[in-house]
Image (cartoon, rainbow, N blue to C red):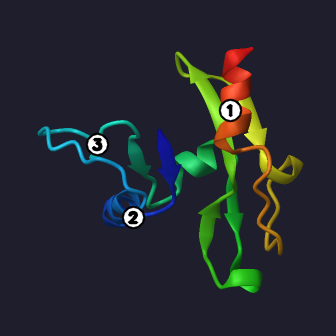
Amino acid sequence: YCVSVNDAFVMRQWGLAQGLDEDKTVGSNGFQKVKLIPDGAALFTRGMGMSATWEAERGFGERSWRYSAVINDGKVEKLFIEGGGVSQDFGPDPFEVSDAGTMLAYLKE
């Protein structure tokens, strides 16, 4: 799954731009192998404690800090949070520990 503080239309276009194969089944979340979940009002993001505002640096409103998570039966098993934690109006946009390689290595342990 991939959650983003965007609407469903943006998420679909992003998925298409990434080359994901659409799932045309009625009631599907849009794509076959990766489910893109819009969090337009940032409710899930806030609940995870990952809300970040980048207004001064990038002119963005509320967004999600970059992270990846393993969630089993509704419980967070492991979090990989960029930069060691959420920062507000932070200049750099780190991408070192929330990547697919880090997650796959953890899952193979």
Q: Is residue 63 left or right of residue 92?
A: left
Instruction: Read off the residue under disc 1.
Output: 103
Q: Is residue 65 left or right of residue 30?
A: right
Quarter of the image holding residue 12? bottom left
- In the rendered image, the quadrant that contains the C terminus is top right
Percent x, y for residue 20? 36, 50
Q: Is residue 16 above or below residue 29?
A: below
- How far is the residue under mark 3 from the one under mark 1? 22 Å
Q: Is residue 11 above or below residue 106?
A: below
Circle 3 residues within 10 Å: few <14, some 14–19, many ≥20: some
Q: At 30% from the left edge and 38% from the top edge, which residue is drawn?
A: 32
Q: At 86% from the left edge and 53% from the top edge, which residue is drawn?
A: 83
Instruction: Read off the residue under disc 3.
Output: 29
Find residue 42 and name its label.
Answer: none
Q: Nearer the viewer, mark 3 or mark 1?
A: 1
Find residue 17 and name its label.
Answer: 2
Q: At 44% from the left edge and 61% from the top edge, which residue is drawn?
A: 40
Q: At 43% from the left edge and 58% from the top edge, which residue is drawn?
A: 18
- How far is the residue under mark 2 from the one under mark 3? 16 Å
Closer to us: 61 or 105: 105
Closer to the N terminus: mark 3 or mark 1?
A: 3
Closer to the N terminus: mark 1 or mark 2?
A: 2
Q: Secondary structure at mark 1?
A: helix
Q: Secondary structure at mark 2?
A: helix
Quarter of the image holding residue 90? bottom right
Q: Nearer the viewer, mark 2 or mark 3?
A: 2
**Residue flagged by tag 3: what amino acid is it?**
Asn
**Residue flagged by tag 1: what amino acid is it?**
Met
Q: Secondary structure at mark 3?
A: loop
Closer to the N terminus: mark 2 or mark 3?
A: 2
Residue contact between numbered discs 1 and 2, judged by CB atoms under 8 Å: no
